[in-house]
Amino acid sequence: MQQATDAEIDQSFADGEILRTHALRPTWHFVTPADIRWILALTAPRVHLANAFMYRKLELDGEFFKRCNTVLASALRGGQQLTRDELRDILDKSGIAVSDNLRMAYIMMQAELDGLICSGARRGRQFTYALLEERVPPVATMDRQTALVELARRYFASRGPATVQDFAKWSGLTITDANRGLEAVKGYLQTETAYGQVYWLAETIAASQELSPSAHMLSIYDEYISGYKDRSTMGNDDIGARLFALGNALSYIAVIDGQIVGTWKRKLTKNAVIVETNLFSSLSEAEDRAVNAAIQRYGDFLNLPVVAA
């Protein structure tokens, strides 16, 4: 989807060609209908383990979740797509106290992990939920080992060079399972050793094929940032310290040739997208052109003119 626009992706999401659910490590991910069930079956047990402390703290046990799931299924049956607040009201009227936002968040996450619900179409700026069985046609099941191998293959093919520790962190699986998956696909991969670590990748890109400088304006949740355990090769210690100091003020990341060079912010208006950059050091003319081109690509993606702040 390299040429897709924001509007086209929104439409795909509304049509259910892209789904949002909790999977892998405990956070939301976008997945395809063909993949959602086997990814949930493989990774949900580990997410439940990670959530176990909060389940106990919020007094959420198996019987409680069963009651919630029954109510949610009844409310959404027949193609209904409801917001979290609407479902909260329905649970409350059924005698299930969910006024606490954190409690409600874990109730909904558990229902996603159990494969009961997934995303529906957005209603304006609000997300909705739908029954997974109604949103996604049945597909052939996949046994656990096959799913593990498939996830490993996709990870190293799309995110390599990466280590087995990176794969474990990204997937939420144990190191043992990560190694099992890697062992099954390593015959299709190449290795590179750098910084005292072994990295696995699908293929080596010849230097002559690389465009340099190449800039990307990324979300802080982009896979380039969050898909790895060790991010030290993306910038020196000073860069890491700068990002850490920004804390919650950190919004988006600017990258040139794989190196973090600063942050950026965007503000959407009706007629333009206003982009403000905060670069950590001065750029060469070529690097500056690359950054401006990346910002322009973002404007094209939104179908809005770009205004520099």
Image (cartoon, rainbow, N blue to C red):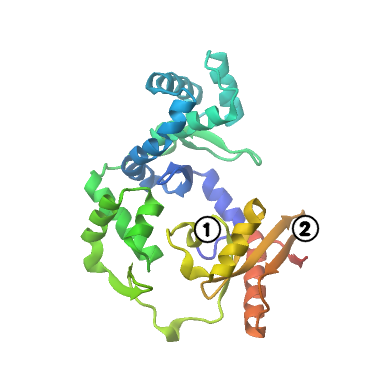
Is 132 placed above or below 257 here? above
Figure quadrant of residue 261:
bottom right
Q: Please tell me whether mark 1 or mark 2 is closer to you in this view.
A: 1
The image position of residue 233, as x and y in percent, is 47, 70
Is 215 placed above or below 30 here? below
The image position of residue 167, as x and y in percent, is 36, 57
For the residue marked with disc 1, what is the amino acid? Asp
Query: Foreground: 20 or 48?
Result: 48
The image position of residue 122, as x and y in percent, is 59, 40
The image position of residue 175, as x and y in percent, is 30, 52
Q: Quadrant of the C terminus?
A: bottom right
Q: Is residue 212 visible?
A: yes
Q: Which residue is mark 1?
A: 222
Residue in the picture at 39% in, 64% down: 158
Q: Earlier in the sequence, mark 1 or mark 2?
A: 1
Query: Foreground: 5 or 256?
Result: 256
Is 203 placed above or below 134 here? below
User: Do the numbered discs 1 and 2 sit on residues whose CB atoms are within 8 Å?
Assistant: no
Residue in the picture at 52% in, 16% down: 96
For the residue marked with disc 2, what is the amino acid? Asn
Residue lying at the far bottom of the rendered structure? 208
Disc 1/disc 2 C-alpha distance (Å):
26 Å
Q: Which residue is mark 2?
A: 271
Q: Secondary structure at mark 2?
A: loop
Is 91 placed above or below 230 here? above
Residue in the picture at 37% in, 51% down: 171
- Is 227 placed left or right of 91 in the picture? left
